[in-house]
Amino acid sequence: MPKFLWTQRSNFGPSPRAFHGTAYDSNRRRVVLFGGSRNQPGTFFGDTWEWDGSYWTQMDDIGPAPRSGHAMSYHSNRRVTLLFGGTIVGANAAGANPNDTWQMGWRRVDAAGGFRSKRSFFACHGVRSRAEKHGAVRR
């Protein structure tokens, strides 16, 4: 059985977190990471980071509300990274599951047909010029 050795590539990057979203932008050859949560009640992230294979870069923090358990996918035909759903907390959103879709550059978009329910903790991928959801936790 082969042994794998982990090597720290950078001392700078996103803080430790869970339930974040990631997508690989094959056009720009970057991994995009958004949001997530810490193991402390109510600590949700709304930051965006990109990994180029060597270094993390923090992007603008203007975008979707901080959230965790959301899905992200790169749509190769349109060359955009999409984000959907998750769980958000805040003054008016205690544990809410938004039914929103965002496009990288962080602008809200109307997903044609939309997903029929508010969902979090699922995966989606781009195929045949559309994003598809697979599995979910209905809340």
Image (cartoon, rainbow, N blue to C red):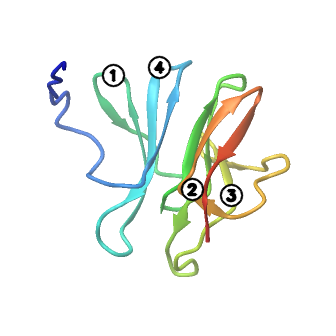
Q: Do callouts 2 and 4 mark residues in contact (Cβ within 8 Å)?
A: no
Q: Nearer the viewer, mark 2 or mark 4?
A: 4
Q: Do callouts 3 and 1 mark residues in contact (Cβ within 8 Å)?
A: no
Q: At 56% from the left edge and 48% from the top edge, which residue is drawn?
A: 71
Q: Quadrant of the C terminus?
A: bottom right
Give neighbour class at mark 2: few <14, some 14-19, many 20+ (Cα, 10 Å): many
Q: Which residue is mark 3?
A: 100
Which numbered disc, 2 or 3, marks the residue that appears first in the sequence? 2
**The disc label shown at residue 64, or none:** 2
Q: Amino acid at mark 4?
A: Arg
Q: Do callouts 4 and 1 mark residues in contact (Cβ within 8 Å)?
A: yes
Relative vertical location of residue 73 with respect to residue 88 in this rendering, above or below: above
Task: State how far apart marks 4 and 3 are (Cα).
Answer: 26 Å
Q: Position of residue 59 (x, y in %)?
A: 43, 40
Q: At 36% from the left edge and 69% from the top edge, which residue is drawn?
A: 43
Q: Position of residue 56 (x, y in %)?
A: 31, 33
| Residue 78 quadrant | top right
**The disc label shown at residue 53, or none:** 1
Q: Do callouts 2 and 3 mark residues in contact (Cβ within 8 Å)?
A: yes
Q: Which residue is mark 4?
A: 29
Q: Label 3's element?
A: loop
Q: Label 2's element?
A: loop
Q: Amino acid at mark 1?
A: Gly
Task: State how far apart marks 2 and 4 are (Cα).
Answer: 23 Å
Q: Amino acid at mark 2?
A: Pro
Which numbered disc, 2 or 1, marks the residue that appears first in the sequence? 1
Task: State how far apart marks 4 and 1 are (Cα).
Answer: 8 Å
